[in-house]
Every structure is written in structure tokens, then in C-alpha cells.
Amino acid sequence: MRKTLALLSLSLGIAVVNPLWPVVAQVIIPQPAPVPVPVPAPVPVTPEVVPPLQPISPATACNSQNCLGWDEQLWGRNGDRQALLTSIDNSLRYLGTNKAIAVYQTYSIPEITLDRVRRSLVRFRQLVLSSKSAAELQAAVHKEFVFYQSIGNDGKGTVKFTAYYEPEYTASRVRTSVYKYPLYRVPPDFKEWAKPHPKRVDLEGKDGLLGNKSKLRGLEMLWFRDRFDPYMIQIQGSAQIKLTNGQRTSVGFAGGTDYPWTSIGGELAKDGKLPLSGLTMPKLLSYFRQNPREMSNYLPRWERFVFFQETNGAPATGSISVPVTAERSIATDKSLMPPGALALINNSFPYPNSRGRLEARRVSRFVLDQDTGSAIKGPGRVDYFMGTGKLAGDRAGITGGNGSLYYLLLKE
């Protein structure tokens, strides 16, 4: 305290004894103008781009609790090795096309090349044929392959799964009082359509019966008795068709307007019509059967409109222009994931039990990445192709949950 007071007194004394000194000093000695200090321009920070796939260590791929690559569904009485081999062959056919060459020239992960993906498939096919059990195949895969894991939707590998299927419906080639809801061909001038494109409600009306007032007049290819049938075909992207004259045909994706996916189930939940928790396709269908007028309120909320071409009984085809195989093909975001590549998924899927009821079973399956979809965006989404027909639809309608996704590539 004393030291403080002494310093204060001293400073006051100086101030009293020399009250004019600062003024005199300013008069006698001109002060230079302050020199502005240049402020450096901010350096733009480029966010780090994280690759959608990351190689994992052998310890991660095979630890004391789990070892990746166990696919028991390839062996046994109901084994489907032939389905997997067929799917591999389809991908190999794609990888030999100019389209595949162009895609892989700009693929974002340099070490995942067209040649490496192709060689990986050829070698894996040999191992599937030569292995006599799931354990033998698993051991061979761990010896020769590297696992690349999707970073998922959280950066930690969490991948949301859904499933799709190829429905079967009855339709008429001509409009009748019963079959009155159309499925449309792609307009011949569709590539010239100005954007923003017309919305669903503009093309078919709120009730799906815009008819002669529609811009699509004359492009009707098939007519359905239930409005939800052509809507479901637009969601799934293909369908097998039983015609009213007894013949059969099929339809496949031919184009679509430029609008994002909107979940009708999510819209119903948002409006409090159905609980979001546990909402499945069967529950959605049941709601619309009980409240058919609600389709006019909710179906137009998915603004995208999808066009089709007749495929004359051909199987469902993926975005890489090869057939998709039941439970051996997946759809992912093709701006991120390697098309046609060998993958491994782990998730719960519904299977019929001995009483014919569907119950969830967690499985690991080798699959081929052969499709995409308007709702499949980001590294954390996989759509699993369940197959054709009612059972496939029932299973696809209740598939969900979080799992994991890996790609397998030969060690370099």
C-alpha cells in the first residue's frame, strides 16, 4: 500500500511541476503522422473433403466379437450362390462399357479404379466357386481383400437402410370406367422442357384424373384401377404387369422431373395423421384404403413425376443398365459410391418364419452396387432390392434400421 501511495504522489508531483511540458513538446517537435498498418486479407478456408469410404484396419475387420464377411446364405438347402454369381456377372458386363470407363476416370477416391474394381470381382467370383463354406470364403476374403467402410450419415459408419421391390399389378391397355388411372410414357420433347419442371399436380391433377387437360395427353401407356398402383410404380421404378387380356408385360424407368423425394408417410406424420414411429408401407396403404380421399391431399406433395417405357417382361434394371438381383443388389448415391463394385452389408431384414410371419434377422450379405434412387442421397443411405411380387413388397415395406456398408477391393 505504501509503495502504491508513493508512486501515486510522485506521478502527481511531476504533473504539477511540468503542466505545460506536453504542450511545448508538441510545438517544438512535430509528431509524424501515424503510418497505417496493413491488415492482411482473410485467407479463405477450404473445408476438408472427407472421402465417403475409408479403409479399415484388419483388427477392425476381424476382432474377437465379430469378423466381417460371414454370409451363411450362400450355402445350405436354400443357398443362393447362383444369384450372387449372376449379379457379379452383371456388374462385370457394366464395367466393360464406355459409360463405366468415363465414370471411373473422375471417381473421387484415386485408389479405387475401374481396373481394381474389375479384378476384385473376377477374383471374388473365383473364391465363391472354390469355397466350400461360409468360413472358408470369409478367410480367403480377409487374406486377399481390403475393406473400405462408408463413413455413414454421422461420420462414424452409421448407414440407414430401406428396401425396394418390383411390384406386380393388373392393368389395361385402354381406359375403362374401372381402369382409369394412367401410367405415362416419357414425352418426346422432355429434354427440352424448361425448368422448373411442372409439378405432379400440374401433370395429373390432385385426383390423378386430369386427363385431356394434362400436358401428357396421348402419352398414356397403361391404365390401373387403383390410383396408388401407378404411384407405387413411380416410387419403385419398375413393375411386372398382368394385362386384362391375359398377356404379360413390364415397365421400367424412362425419366423423371427435377424435384427431390418427399416422404408421404413423413407428411402424414407431420400432420398428426399417423405416428412416425413404426410407420411402414403396410400401415400407409391401410390408411389410404380407409381414407381414399386423402390421396388427393398427400400424393401431390411428392412433386416429382416419373415416366416409363415398356420393357416386355424384362427384369427390373438398375441405374447402371444391368438387371438387379433379389437380395444381391443395392442402390446407393452414385455421386459417391463406386458403381458395379462388390460390397458387404450388415443390417436387420425381415424373413418369413415357420409360421409364415415376418421376423427380423440381422444378416451379413455380399451384394453388388447396381442402382440408385431419388431418395438415396449421401454416404449414409442404402436401398436393398428385395425382389419381385407380394412377399418382396411385404418385406420391403417393413425394412429399416441402421446398419453398415463396406466395399471389398483386392489388396494392392
Image (spheres, rainbow, N blue to C red):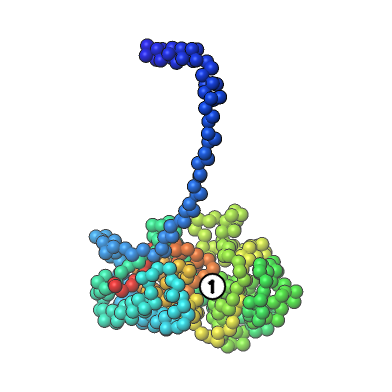
Whether residue 126 sits left or right of residue 100 in the image: it is: left
Q: Residue shown at 59%/76% (left/top)? A: 255
On the rendered image, what quadrant is the C terminus found in? bottom left
Query: Is residue 169 among the parts visible in the rendering?
Result: no
Give the answer, above or below, for where 37 lies relative to 261.
above
Residue at x 52%, y 15% (from the top left corner)? 19
| Residue 342 image point, x, y percent | 37, 74
Residue at horizontal 25%, vertical 79%? 132
Q: Which residue is mark 1?
A: 236
The residue lying furthest to the front in this view is 28
* Image x and y of residue 178, in percent: 68, 77
Q: Label 1: few (<14), some or many (≥20) within 10 Å? A: some
Q: Quadrant of residue 7?
A: top left
The relative height of residue 281 versus residue 217 in the rendered view (above or below) is: above
> Along the horizontal axis of the image, is 74 left or right of 262?
left
Q: Quadrant of residue 336?
A: bottom left
What x and y, as percent, mark residue 125? 32, 80
Q: Is residue 375 visible?
A: yes
Q: Secondary structure at mark 1?
A: helix
Quadrant of the drawing holding the N terminus: top left
What is the count of numbered marks?
1
Expressed as whole percent of the image width and height from the top left, the position of residue 144 reads 26, 73
Residue lying furthest right in this view?
213
Amino acid type of the residue that numbered disc 1 sits on in the rendered structure: Gln
Give 344 or 196, whichever is nearer the viewer: 196
Q: Quadrant of residue 349?
A: bottom left
**Which residue is at the front of the view, 117 or 186?**
117
